[in-house]
């Protein structure tokens, strides 16, 4: 974690402001809002003016299964939700993938912008997250009985995607709605983008990026209609950062190490050469090696995720392999992964019978903008769609919930985490527009 004294104080000072928003009397216009049913409102008025809207949107999103590759239903839901609220919504279809089985429905990103948006420069701030989740599906659950309008701030909400990243999606939409309602932004300032396949290959964001950057793909329909030109000054990415502003995240690379030996009878090890032994010694050296570090991102780390080798307990193994996932902390986004590859290569070359194959060059450390007053900061050790959107824009990375539960059985967050994120996104959107 990377917290400067200045930013930490900013974070502490911001807390009363968040508490302020949760006070019902803060919003005189609250009574006019058509939220929730009147019965439940009488019993327990919502703590923030938007709590009902936020929780019911979050619930709908989590209840719809959307494991990577099967995001169609949640995409259609979002289209309906945003269209109803006056947005222009476009489904951006990804090119059919060879990997997919025939019969699989085509994947699409959801793009939306307030309908006042005209073809005069286009939205400047892209507010984006992903709508796919990791398997398996886990049903939505709240730790208290009752309708969404009388849930307390500390109520836990669990279910697959409740954090990663449907919490971000819900908070981002409500934040944009609030800013528009309060006239703090105009309809031309912002665009929403919810992509597919972030959890697998980043295919959704990569496709959006290639269209945006006018690569070979055909433009989205709105371009043809002259409805939307993009001029992205900043992009705000929603991922679980515990409502801290990420200064960036480590890069990602990987590969397979093959060890080649000589088979023989296990009783006479000196007559053969054990591939598993060669591999194990190399992996220990690799785990102990310095693969590069930086002050901002810490150490490059290696996960030896899969080890295979040998054919039987009493046979000297001829072949063995290890699959590596490496979190890159050295160099920059462009060259960091290759710096690590050279270090791994050098270490293996000093030993007999080893080979580095299937190198996935990935990317080096990704820097995000984090000099915004009022936010605690952090460095993430996981990958995001940030490097998948090319262009000269500034990137922010922020969202509710913790990555430590994000892919687990216990994925959950509290009502107040969601509400704090709405306030956080509002501040970041305004900050991005001023930049
Ligand atoms: C980084 O690696 C060095 C040794 O290369 C070690 O001394 C240090 O504790 C590591 N830092 C962290 C944060 O793990
Ligand atoms: C990355 O670092 C290399 C070597 O220091 C430099 O040549 C290159 O311009 C850097 N790229 C970016 C995008 O900063």
Image (tube, rainbow, N blue to C red):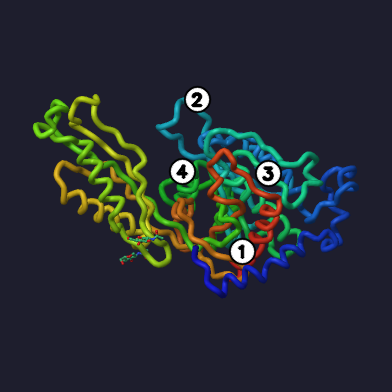
Task: Label 2, secondary structure: give it.
Answer: loop
Looking at the picture, does residue 373 appear above or below residue 338? below
Mark 4–mark 1 Cα distance, whole angstroms, equals: 26 Å
Pointer 3 residue: 157
Mark 2–mark 3 Cα distance, whole angstroms, equals: 35 Å
Pointer 1 residue: 428
Asked if one can make out residue 213 in the rendered structure from this viewpoint, the answer is no
Tell me if mark 1 has few (under 14), some (14-19) or many (20+) residues whose alpha carbon lies within 10 angstroms of its own. Answer: many
**409 or 422, which is in the foreground?**
409
Of discs 2 and 1, which sits in the foreground?
A: 1
Asked if one can make out residue 407 in the rendered structure from this viewpoint, the answer is yes
Give coordinates of residue 380: x percent, y percent: 48, 56
Tell me if mark 4 has few (under 14), some (14-19) or many (20+) residues whose alpha carbon lies within 10 angstroms of its own. Answer: many
Mark 3–mark 1 Cα distance, whole angstroms, equals: 25 Å
Q: Residue at x 23, y 44 (%)?
A: 281
Q: Which mark is residue 103?
A: 2
Q: Relative to 176, is 335 on the left or the right?
A: left
Pointer 4 residue: 203
The C terminus: image quadrant: bottom right
């Amino acid at each position: 974690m990377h917290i400067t004294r200045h930013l930490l104080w900013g974070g502490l000072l911001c807390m009363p402001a968040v508490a302020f928003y949760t006070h019902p009397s803060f919003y005189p216009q609250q009574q006019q809002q058509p939220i929730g049913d009147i019965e439940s409102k009488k019993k327990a008025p919502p703590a923030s003016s938007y709590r009902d809207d936020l929780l019911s949107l979050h619930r709908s999103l989590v209840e719809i299964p959307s494991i990577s590759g099967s995001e169609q239903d949640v995409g259609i839901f979002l289209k309906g939700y945003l269209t109803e609220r006056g947005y222009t919504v476009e489904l951006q279809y990804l090119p059919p993938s060879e990997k997919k089985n025939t019969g699989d429905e085509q994947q699409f990103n959801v793009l939306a912008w307030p309908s006042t948006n005209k073809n005069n420069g286009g939205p400047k701030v892209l507010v984006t997250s992903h709508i796919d989740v990791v398997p398996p599906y886990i049903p939505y659950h709240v730790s208290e009985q009752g309708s969404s309008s009388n849930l307390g701030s500390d109520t836990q909400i669990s279910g697959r995607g409740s954090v990663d990243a449907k919490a971000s999606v819900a908070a981002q939409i409500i934040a944009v709605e609030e800013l528009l309602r309060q006239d703090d932004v105009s309809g031309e300032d912002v665009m929403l983008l919810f992509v597919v396949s972030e959890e697998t290959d980043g295919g959704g964001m990569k496709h959006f990026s290639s269209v945006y950057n006018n690569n070979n793909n055909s433009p989205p329909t709105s371009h043809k209609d002259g409805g939307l030109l993009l001029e992205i000054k900043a992009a705000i990415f929603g991922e679980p950062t515990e409502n801290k502003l990420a200064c960036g995240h480590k890069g990602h690379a990987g590969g397979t190490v093959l060890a080649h030996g000589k088979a023989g009878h296990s009783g006479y090890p000196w007559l053969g050469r054990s591939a598993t032994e060669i591999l194990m010694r190399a992996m220990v050296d690799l785990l102990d090696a310095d693969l590069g570090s930086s002050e901002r991102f810490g150490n490059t780390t290696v996960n030896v995720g899969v080890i295979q080798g040998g054919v039987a307990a009493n046979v000297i193994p001829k072949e063995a392999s290890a699959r590596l996932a490496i979190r890159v902390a050295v160099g920059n986004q462009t060259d960091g992964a290759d710096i690590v590859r050279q270090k791994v290569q050098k270490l293996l070359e000093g030993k007999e019978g080893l080979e580095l194959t299937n190198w996935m060059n990935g990317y080096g450390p990704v820097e995000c903008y984090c000099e915004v007053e009022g936010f605690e900061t952090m460095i993430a050790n996981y990958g995001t769609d940030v490097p998948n959107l090319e262009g000269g824009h500034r990137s922010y990375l922020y969202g509710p919930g913790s990555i430590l539960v994000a892919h687990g059985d216990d994925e959950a967050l509290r009502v107040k985490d969601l509400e704090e994120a709405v306030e956080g996104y509002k501040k970041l959107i305004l900050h991005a527009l001023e930049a």
